[in-house]
Image: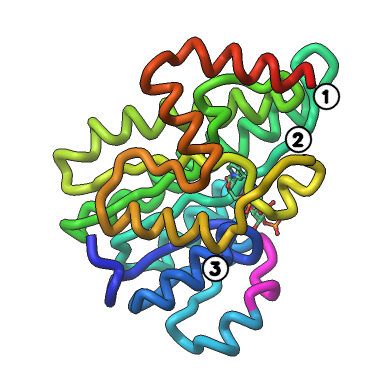
Amino acid sequence: MKIQDSKALVTGANRGIGREIVLGLLDRGVGTVYCGARKPESLAELVEEYGERVVPLQLDITDEGQVREAAQSVPELDLLINNAGVLHWGSFAEGDLEDIRQDMETNYFGTLRMVRAFLPQLEKSGDAVIVNLHSVVSFGNMAFIGGYSASKAAEHSLTQALRSELGPKGIQVLGVYPGPVDTDMAKELEMDKTPPAQVAQAILDGVEAGKAYTFPDPMAEQVGATWKENPLAVETLFAEMAEM
Ligand SMILES: NC(=O)c1ccc[n+]([C@@H]2O[C@H](COP(=O)([O-])OP(=O)(O)OC[C@H]3O[C@@H](n4cnc5c(N)ncnc54)[C@H](OP(=O)(O)O)[C@@H]3O)[C@@H](O)[C@H]2O)c1
């Protein structure tokens, strides 16, 4: 699809990768970008700088009422970027069950809720794209973020199903699988991290090229290549990393 003059929506638009995606969309000439945020006031700077091309939306993706209201206030949509996500640290054996549930509620059910709510607008577009932000841990569980990994695997499975279900309706469904990115989410990770602006550019290149799988950073590329050749090797690699 062409981003120029399109209408897009980004969840979790106020910081991290989401904010960089919004800036990238504006740079590529998006007509309107609806910016979902739990605290819309956190978007004030963007609105001040870009004016009416930026439309703030009160949007907690775990809140059915807010998602429904947001969908009612967006008449047309070509590009839905499901970026919002949470990560709770902890293993299945020792982590808090409520944290594990929260990761699934936000990353999997939140994304699913957004897709269902905005389907009418996307179907009307005729040339629509949905992008779901997954992770390299969609392909193999890292034990110290067990619940998060499971939620990202579930979200990947959702993307696969939506791709075959919505393709015939003129909606492409794309998945993005980053490694560590330098945002608040990964601040406790001590390893090389890719700047979020670089990840955002790779995501938008993927949108314009209609890439089903985007691996937006060096670690992602490496894991993606391993996964294509030998999926079991990813499980082994992540098990070794979890022991380090
Ligand atoms: N950073 C990484 O290393 C990495 C790697 C692979 C994949 N990813 C994925 O990339 C996406 C963006 O991550 P990030 O690194 O930019 O994280 P981040 O800096 O922690 O930002 C997360 C964003 O999601 C929003 N959010 C969280 N829960 C929400 C909810 N219930 N409803 C609406 N918005 C919500 C946050 O809003 P508030 O400001 O209100 O909290 C924030 O805007 C996530 O899906 C993440 O899983 C990140």
Q: Nearer the viewer, residue 183 or 31?
A: 183
Identify residue type, mark 1.
Asp
Residue 148 is marked as none
Do residues under tags 2 and 1 come within 8 Å of each other at their CB atoms? yes
Magenta residue check for 41: yes
Identify which amino acid the numbered label 2 is placed on: His
Q: In the image, is 201 to the left or to the right of 196?
A: left
> What segment is highlighted magenta in the picture?
38-43
For residue 96, the mark is 1
How far apart are the alpha carbons under marks 1 and 3?
A: 31 Å
Please report the residue visible at 57 percent of the width from the left and 83 percent of the height from the top: 47
Q: Amino acid at mark 3?
A: Leu
Question: x, y (%) of residue 190?
Answer: 79, 41
Q: Is residue 171 magenta?
A: no
Secondary element type, mark 1? loop
Q: Position of residue 31 (x, y in %)?
A: 34, 78
Foreground tag (1 vs 3): 1
As helix, strand or loop, the secondary structure at mark 2 comes to loop
Residue 212 lies in what quarter of the image?
top left
Asked where in the image residue 229 lies, by quadrant, the reply is top left
Image coords of residue 210 (percent x, y): 25, 49
Q: Nearer the viewer, mark 2 or mark 3?
A: 2
Distance from disc 2 to disc 3, alpha carbons, whole Å, reads: 25 Å
**Mark 1 or mark 3, which has the lower sequence index?**
3
Q: Which mark is residue 57?
A: 3
Evaluate if marks 2 and 3 touch, with contact meaning CB atoms under 8 Å apart: no
Q: Residue at x 64, y 71 (%)?
A: 40
Numbered circle sitting on residue 88: 2
| C-beta proximity under 8 Å, tags 1 and 3 | no
> Is residue 121 visible to us here?
no
